[in-house]
Amino acid sequence: MDEDQYRRLYHEINQQRCVFEKALLNRRCDCRRKQAFLLATREGMACQSAESLARCDQFLTTLRQAARFALHELTITGPLPHNKELKVQAGGCLALSAHLYPEHSGQPRVDIDALLNTALARYPHLDDLPYSELVRGVVHYVSRPSARRS
């Protein structure tokens, strides 16, 4: 299967693509609304809830815009290059988790849906979240520790 065929079939199968797919596939985050699937030996993630998907999309878009300066991007109109996008997704979720649950810092994997539910219980709108604190989490996120040479 060539790459164009794969992309076309992927979008046919996955009508509600999870916007946090990179963080989920990297195993740094989890979500109770996810639906994992395999296509041509590659794993993909779909969202089972249109409402949750819209909320996650709003959060991720706002987080990307807040992190624009820190990521050295002038404008952001969609997903970023892979590593920067992973930093925003996973780093932002882990920073939000540390903010909401300081006693559980270092938690291995956070449930994104539960995290946003808790955030909305504490803050009236997603726009009211402490994005300056979340951006620090994005900046300090390391997707893969560098290998040490002997």
Image: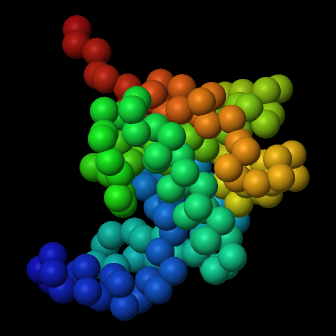
Residue sitting nearer the eye, 147 or 33: 33
User: Is residue 44 in view from this perspective?
Assistant: yes
Q: Which residue is drawn at the image coordinates 35% and 42% (left, top)?
A: 84
Q: Residue furthest top?
A: 150
Q: Position of residue 93 (x, y in %)?
A: 61, 44
In the image, residue 39 above or below residue 45? below
Closer-to-camera residue (105/66)? 66
Would residue 143 appear left or right of 125 to someone viewing this image?
left
Residue plotted at (28% across, 15% down): 148
Q: Return the x and y of residue 130 as percentages of the image width and height.
A: 68, 35
The answer to whether residue 75 is left or right of residue 1 is: right
Q: Is residue 43 above or below residue 138?
A: below
Q: Is residue 35 above or below residue 30?
A: below
Work out whether residue 27 or residue 46 is closer to the camera in this orientation and state it. 46
- Residue 27 makes an appearance in the image: no
Judged from this view, the residue extending furthest toward the right is 121
Q: Position of residue 62 (x, y in %)?
A: 55, 51
